[in-house]
Image (cartoon, grey):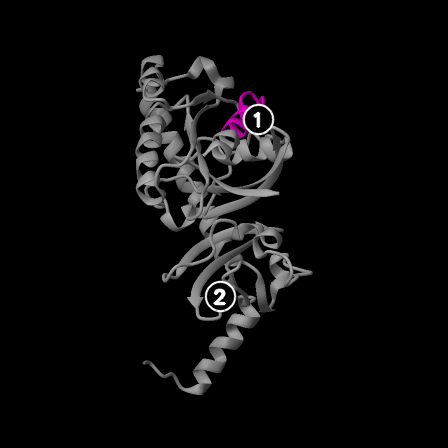
């Protein structure tokens, strides 16, 4: 069976850990729990009759004290870039992180997740910003770790992109 | 090369074994485990098999091996049962060495501080948006 390493990347409190928890365990917790270092998880999925074991590296969110450690990225086949739709600056951070990741590991498949879609009334990210990214051939998926919206789709789509490489 | 008195070296090694659950593995250049030792069960690593690829048995190694000429340090890797390990990977002629040290206690101290810092940052961002 194929085994692929996938990293979760984004600013702190964008919901990376909750997305993994929803995807792997179908569990969501309202309580915010920060990640220090990296949490490893795995899940087997099937794409086009091919079984793939995803090894998920849930990296700590970047902030003033914890900067992205490039050694965590080694050997990644793809990554999920996560922004919090209710905090517009997390999208700019995601764009910046994407550039830094590509400097380290080269161009590998990725997907941008605009998370917390269950909080639509607090949404800050403008459609025009998203459209610019779409115009640059980014794949963008709105998600909610709480409801599960877009979660399976994001991991499946990323895996498909990885397999097409 | 720095030479410490034997007394210090022995104390240090005993400390690492007892307090940091020192464990090691060697993975050959074909990706198979060639030897292992130390307190591997602390990290949930049991029933290792030389005839199976290392990354199929120790899934966090996926993508990390084989090493080139450089060593790698991966801090604070939360692998199983709440255990947090620092991972050191070194290349050698006989294969790639993987060293695990338990840093769970250190992790617990940092995580509570980081939690406070992040919660405060979220409150500040929220207040900034309101004003």
Q: The C terminus of chain B lies in which quarter of the figure? A: top left
Assess disc 1: are there few (<14), some (14-19) or many (≥20) residues with their C-alpha within 10 Å of its C-alpha: some
Q: Are marks 2 and 1 on the same chain?
A: no
Disc 2 crowd rating (10 Å Cα; few below 14, some 14-19, many 20+) is many
Please indicate, yes or no, whether residue A145 appears anywhere in the rendered image: no
Question: Circle 1 — which element?
Answer: helix
Q: Residue furthest bottom?
A: B6
Q: Position of residue A14 (x, y in %)?
A: 44, 30
In the rendered image, residue A152 lying in the magenta stretch gets the answer: yes
Horizontally, residue B62 falls left or right of residue A44, namely left
Q: Nearest to the eye among marks 2 and 1: give it.
A: 2
Check the picture and name the quadrant holding the N terminus of chain B: bottom left
Q: Observer-nearest residue: A163 or A126?
A: A163
Percent coordinates x, y for residue A139 in the rendering:
42, 23
Identify residue for label 2. Answer: B97
Specify whether residue A10 is painted magenta.
no
> CA separation, marks 2 and 1?
36 Å
Mark 1, chain letter?
A
Instruction: Name above or below for residue A71 compared with residue B20.
Output: above
Residue B87 image position (x, y, % from top left): 48, 59
| Part of the protein shown in magenta | A145-157
Q: Residue at coordinates 44% horizontally, 55% vertically from top-left?
A: B75
Secondary structure type for disc 2: strand
Residue drawn 41% across the image and 21% down it: A86
Q: Nearer the viewer, residue B25 or A52?
A: A52
Cβ–Cβ below 8 Å for labels 2 and 1? no
Residue A91: quadrant of the picture: top left
Answer with left or right where residue A80 lies relative to residue B45. Answer: left
Residue A152 marker: 1
Residue A162 lies, with reference to residue A67, above or below; the image says: above
The quadrant holding residue A62 is: top left
């Amino acid at each position: 069976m194929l085994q692929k390493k996938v990293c979760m990347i984004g600013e702190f409190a964008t919901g990376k850990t909750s997305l993994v928890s929803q995807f792997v365990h179908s569990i969501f917790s309202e309580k915010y729990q920060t990640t220090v270092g990296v949490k490893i998880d795995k899940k087997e999925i099937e794409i086009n009759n091919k079984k793939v074991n995803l090894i998920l590296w849930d990296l700590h969110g970047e902030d003033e004290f914890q900067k992205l450690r490039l050694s965590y990225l080694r050997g990644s086949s793809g990554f999920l870039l996560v922004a919090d739709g209710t905090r517009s600056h997390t999208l700019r951070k995601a764009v910046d992180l994407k550039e830094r990741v590509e400097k380290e590991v080269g161009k590998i498949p990725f997907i941008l997740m605009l998370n917390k879609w269950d909080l639509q009334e607090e949404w800050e990210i403008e459609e025009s910003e998203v459209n610019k990214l779409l115009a640059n051939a980014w794949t963008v998926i709105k998600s909610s770790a709480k409801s599960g919206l877009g979660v399976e789709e994001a991991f499946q789509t990323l895996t498909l992109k990885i397999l097409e490489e | 090369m720095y030479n410490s008195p034997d007394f210090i070296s022995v104390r240090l090694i005993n400390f690492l074994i007892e307090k940091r659950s020192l464990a090691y593995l060697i993975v050959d250049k074909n990706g198979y485990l060639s030897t292992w030792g130390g307190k591997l069960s602390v990290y949930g690593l049991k029933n290792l098999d030389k005839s199976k690829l290392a990354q199929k048995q120790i899934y966090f190694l996926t993508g990390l091996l084989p090493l080139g000429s450089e060593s790698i340090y991966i801090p604070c890797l939360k692998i199983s049962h709440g255990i947090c390990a620092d991972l050191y990977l070194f290349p050698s002629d006989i294969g790639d060495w993987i060293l695990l040290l338990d840093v769970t206690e250190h992790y617990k101290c940092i995580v509570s501080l980081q939690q406070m810092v992040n919660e405060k940052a979220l409150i500040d961002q929220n207040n900034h948006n309101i004003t």
